[in-house]
Image (cartoon, rainbow, N blue to C red):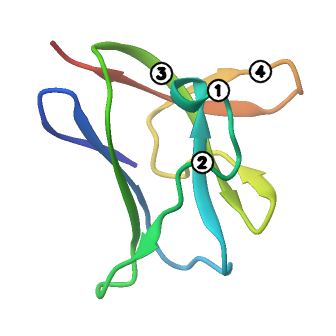
Amino acid sequence: MVVQKAKGKVTFVLEPPVNGSKIFVAGCFNQWNATADPLRKQKDGTYRKSVELAPGQYEYKFVVDGQWLDDPSSPGRRANEFGTLNSTFAVER
């Protein structure tokens, strides 16, 4: 899931159960780089990563130990050229 905390600041949250030692978020905001933005495990068992983004529409996926996964908590999805779905969200002005 994506949580917008303040103007332009969003937090990606992956809820348990998650089986993986290396978890990242990749999307159009980081040129789909599968290792640019690692999530960190929190005390509550979730994995989180906060980033600053300009207002607009975004697509993303989680990468868990090299496997690309759409966000199970995302209400928005868009088909991609690989025949799978990307999760979507908007950053408000």
Helix, strand or loop at mark 4 = loop
> Measuring 57% from the left and 35% from the top, which residue is drawn there?
60
In the rendered image, which quarter is residue 26 located in?
A: top right
Q: Is residue 93 above or below residue 62?
A: above
Q: What's the residue type where badge 4 is placed?
A: Asn
Three-letter residue code for mark 1:
Gln
What's under tag 3, amino acid-wise? Tyr
Q: Are marks 2 and 4 in contact (CB under 8 Å)?
A: no
Q: Earlier in the sequence, mark 1 or mark 2?
A: 1
Side (left or right) of 49 relative to 19: left
Please report the residue visible at 39 percent of the width from the left and 74 percent of the height from the top. 46
Q: Residue at x 64, y 45 (%)?
A: 70
Q: Is residue 5 left or right of residue 38?
A: left
Between circles 1 and 4, the one closer to the viewer is 1
Label drawn at residue 3: none
Mark 2 = which residue? 36
